Amino acid sequence: MGLFKFAQSRSLWMMHFCTGCGAVEMPPTMTSRFDMERFGIAPMATPRQADILLITGYLTVKTLKRVIRSYEQMPDPKYVIGFGSCTLNGGMYWDSYNTIKRLDLYLPVDIYINGCMPRPEAIIEAFVKLREIIAKGEANGWKKYKENIKWYKENQAKVFDVKKWSVIKWE
Amino acid sequence: MGIEGKIVEDIVKRFGDKVRAEVQRERRVKFYTDPINIKPLLYYLKEKGFIHLSSISCVDWIKENQFELVYHLWSYEDKVHLMVKTRISRENPEMETMIPVFPVAETYEREIYEMFGVNFPDNPNLKPLFLEDWDGPPPMRKDFDTRAYVREKYSMIDLTEILRQGMDKIKGVRDEDEIL
Amino acid sequence: MVLKIIEYLGIVFGVIILGLLYGGIARKVIARIHRRYGPPFYQNILDVLKLFAKSNEASHGVMFNLGPVIAFTGVLVSLFFIPLGSFRPLFSFEGDIFVVFYLLVVAPLGMALGAGEGANPNATIGIARGLTLMLGYELVFFLSVLAPMIHYRTASIATLVTVQSAFPHWNVFPFFISAFAGLIALHGMMGEKPFDQVIAPHEIASGPMVEYSGKFLGLLQLYHAVGIIVETGLVVDIFFGGGNWLTFILKTFFLFIALVIINAVMPRFRIGQAVKFYWKYPLVISLIGLLIVTIWR
């Protein structure tokens, strides 16, 4: 129904999980100067209550396990925003032995924000764009994850032990 | 002469030629010694006021086939930074643990074990500190090829390779189909 | 008969929408105090609609699912005993104040059963704090309400409303000491800072709401919305004179905004400090108010 799509695009709850150094741009975006709450976005404490998972910056293998566990605990529909150039191609840590290079191989990403770090104005533009694609019905990362779960799990298995760290059943 | 000179005199008088001393500048003194003398030297320095072990670092001298362990000590009274350096062999590297002298050495030795592979036999807590489920050689050694490891494990997009192929294409050397 | 059912369903729907609007306007007021724009005033309605459109929630069993249902039901049933403006309550008899007090306790107990099922220690801590805080404010609230009850020799809310007919005859003016203690107790009952230890998002990851997602969380938001109207409505009926539907809405609105303004500028007490506070000053104030009434008699 149109009203539910409208409500889903105007009320996005973000999970307050600051994964990398890009998270230092979140407090300015949340507080009075670049107010984020006027777009309906509020930080929530647990993955069970959140819609958006914001991957701010690089992800080491240690954090990736926990992020995937949190992502699988979120209820549908859920969206992932890749923040900073480390999620695109590894960014500054492109030849580091412990960080992942392409977030798209392990989690379905709906919007990327490039920059190192992106300024709050860029973050707000990304949220407005996310709102538009949700209203059109094109933000289907969560459906892609369910349909291609074997491919995602194969990629994840290359970097860590998937059986120990997964919450959902995929085979 | 100053404080640094007095410290050097003191140590040389006590330990003779087992220790080689060098004053680098104001507030920086270095001692070079063999691994067997480290523990008595650290005990003596601790009595002399160097009560703070800031860190233990490790240097990989791959051409000389040796690891060098550096113990960084600081004295609050004299305000002098002391570096006590030893060399150990690079095949099966092992070193005595300094936990009886400075209990905080446990964490630093854990990190050196994880990153360089130096074994500390009596350290009770040599679990990995940062690298969970690590399956390669100790990563800080100079013979660890980071790029090959990353390319194989993380499907890295090698930007230098793409750039080189792009430049070759512009110069007309390569065919368009051979670009990644 | 059918007309009455439709009327009461309409009242329930109206109260839900009104409570959500109050919550949204409260967010706007807090934002303006922080010198920023806030979300639109209908934001809470959008939040609830989004929550009901979620799927794939996790569940820990039947009792876990029933927790929010019991909470919402408890507060909804107590709505039917309170005169809302010119709508007479569904049930009204001598002694219905005590029934309302009991029903307002059912909701946190239902949440306690549900939150204990989900195996999360944050939920247990949150509910324990909520029930401990209740030890503080329930007594003060009851003693402050007892003063007009003793004076007018009645235990029915509807009678208390009809006794105060027009503006100068509001109960708050003769019983201002008891009303003051009652307002402090109301602040704790609504869960506004400095008494929001139950939710406490940064300490215990939102307390009993921590494992609920999707539709259950939507039910909890509705419980909070109806709770606003029920609790402020009770105080407005007893102390500020019910009035017709327009003045009732205005009075509850201004009372709620006064509490929200205090909420926006204060930090949070520790639970021990909160209970001790309630047993020191507000208790003494309400006892003084009670004493004055009995001596006056």
Image (cartoon, coloured by chain):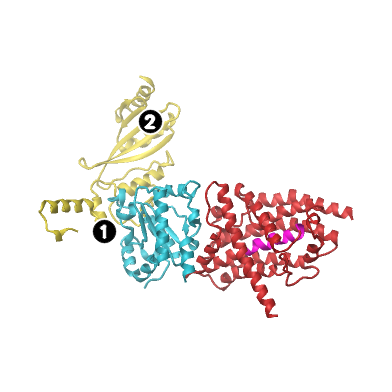
The answer for which chain carries disc 2 is B
Residue B177 sits in quarter: bottom left
Which colour denotes chain C? red
Is A19 left, or right, of C235 in this rendering?
Answer: left
Which colour denotes chain B? yellow
> Dot 2 lies on which element?
strand
Residue A90 included in the magenta stretch of the image: no
Residue stretch in magenta = C225-240
Query: Looking at the image, which is closer to me, A96 or C13?
Result: C13
Is residue B148 shown above or below C214? above
Residue C236 included in the magenta stretch of the image: yes
Q: Residue at x 28, y 57 (%)?
A: B154
Query: Looking at the image, which is closer to me, B4 or A63?
Result: A63
Q: Nearer the viewer, mark 2 or mark 1?
A: 1
Quarter containing the C terminus of chain C: bottom right
Q: Which residue lies under the disc numbered 2?
A: B81
Which colour denotes chain A? cyan
Q: Residue at x 85, y 54 (%)?
A: C293
Q: Which residue lies under the disc numbered 1?
A: B155
Query: Looking at the image, which is closer to me, A74 or A130?
Result: A130
> Dot 1 lies on which element?
loop
Is B171 left, or right, of A99 in this rendering?
Answer: left
The answer for which chain carries disc 1 is B
- Percent position of residue A70, x then y: 44, 61
The residue type indicated by label 1 comes to Ser
